[in-house]
Amino acid sequence: MAETVVEREEKEWTLMFYFASDNPLAPGIVSQLKAIKNAGFHHNANVIAHFDPQTEGTPTHIFDVNLIYKLKNPGESNIGFASKDPFVRNLMEDKLWLEDQQERNGVQIKQRISETIAKGLDYNPPEPPDFRTLIEPEEQNDGEQKKAECDDRKIRPRRRTEIDPETSLREFLKFCSKEYRARHYMLFIIGHGVVVGNDVFLFDEHVSAKHSLTLREFGNAIEEFQKSLENKDSLELISLHSCSMSSIEVAYELQGKAKYLLASQGPAFVGSWPYRQLLIRIFNDLENGRLSDEEIRKTITLIFYCCLHNSTDFMLAGYSFDLCLCDLSKVPALTDRIRNLSNRLVEGLKSQLLRNYILAAHWKAQSFWQEGYTDLYDFCLSLSKRCADFKSGVKKLAEAGMPDEGTTNAEVEETLTRERRLDLLLKFVMNTDAGEMLAAMNAIQTAAGAVMDALTKETDGGTDNIIVRSDFAGPAYQYSHGLSVFFPWAKPSGENRFMDEYGCYKFSEETAWHEFLNEYFKATMRKTRRDEPDERVKPVLRVSEEQKAKEELREDMMSLLYNSEGALSLDSELADEKTRPRDPTGDECTCPSIKNYPRDTRASSVKGKQADPDLLPMSRIFFTDI
């Protein structure tokens, strides 16, 4: 039987809510869905919600919110419903059902709704995507085969499982673009964040394949959606209600695919964004015909303030919060500035003084998510201030001339002491020509200032900056300015996996930040204990060749057995299963160290070399199965 194609009316808005909550976020998501439901409806707006629960075996749902109300009141709107109406609404009637989902008598649920709840209405909603996939049974061993034969079964039955998060997001967006056409779109996402450096974005506990999306996969999914739209410039806002998603890397990945990005550099809490009020705001502006680019920008700016003001109450529970609204069309203006800053920083790492200043600025700047991200503006500000303070001190010392006649001996001695300090400063501490040092500092200051100029938030009425609005509530993130950058203290332990992935980001391809990070990790790594001089430690006595060989063997064994523990380890985050909250070994803390210690503790002459397992008095299994 040929599929009936229903041409649905194009609306002004399609507002998409993607709740990736097959994880502990799920219980709180229900209240967010209720808030969306209670916002009422506008006849010229589609509100489509995706909800993936955590309980195993519970299907993923898609809701056409307040569909029945719209059918009962064609061409009308009911924004926020009646304020004095105590009626409790639910989303059961809004759920879109698959054709194979039937009621107890074998009749399709969709048909039964048409005959009862929607009786007399033009109820013909589209069939949603099937977020389940069939899994073939695994090959059985002899014992299982015997049990199957005893049970008169030859093989295990096929079972259904959920599709992976990337496919799920793509299918939802494809469904919305095909079945709910509109002149303007917004996408709101709730789920686990931290997509840069810790790929647990939209984490799903109950899939058999990949559990999360990478940043590039997310960007590709949005690009695919954008290309499917008749008006390629109609995705007005991507709102990421997830932890640590307001980053330079995310902005670069989404530029040209959406107009605005709303996200936080720090944590995001379920319930902190008032979805009912946001929808009422959009419905009201739609009712008043505010649909020009300038008016939509004002609507999105008001959405920012709604989220910010609602989040201030979380301070009562002791939680701080930050929020940023970006104009993604302004991202290209950052490229040359960040590339220049990165190059200047690489040059600065060659100087011990500037290297220490870069380290100190990194330490002082606002950081997020276990020290993995740093506010780029605040880092530039801290570094620029240190350079300015140094130059000011040098200038004062240089201007300290010989004392006038009649000054006291103490004053003469003080002046001479300053000059001697200046001489030592230039010759010993800086270990370079004063002119070269000051020129390098000026270059870093200029580059940092250019980045800060581009990251300064707009004043009222301005439209030229990438940061449209940025603010915070609470002390923990008071130095946030809107966009963070991946800037850990040491190279991630999964370096061959993640750093290669990071190098493929659009941000890395268009700027030199990736190169700076690699140089920073090398330049700031502490020497091994063997290579660090300590006058209090007596030199090692000469040992026999046999003893030396044993010592080298012990060191090589330790190097091979090392578990790659290090700052910002990705092992637990990227594992197939999340670790239990109460690890019986007491090793549940995943907090990173800000110390950039070498992972190979051997002397520098053999550091990084691989010991040959064939030379060791034990089997290969000792290493491969550890």
Image (spheres, rainbow, N blue to C red):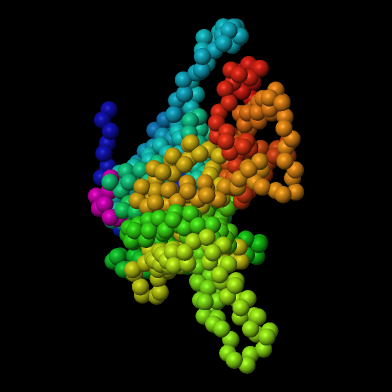
Q: Is residue 234 magenta?
A: yes
Q: Which residue sits at x=51%, y=64%? A: 383
Residue 16 position in % (x across, y down):
40, 51
Locate the C terminus and report the quarter of the image it occupies: top right
Between residue 169 and residue 421, name the one nearer to us: 421
205 displayed left or right of 445: right
Q: Residue furthest front?
A: 405
254 is higher (above) or lower (below) than 205: below
Residue 394 position in % (x across, y down):
53, 73
152 displayed left or right of 247: right
Q: Which residue sits at x=41%, y=43%? A: 503
Residue 400 visible within the image: yes
Q: Which residues are magenta?
A: 228-238
288 displayed left or right of 586: left
Between residue 593 and residue 204, name the one nearer to us: 593
Q: Is residue 35 magenta?
A: no
Locate the N terminus and report the quarter of the image it occupies: top left
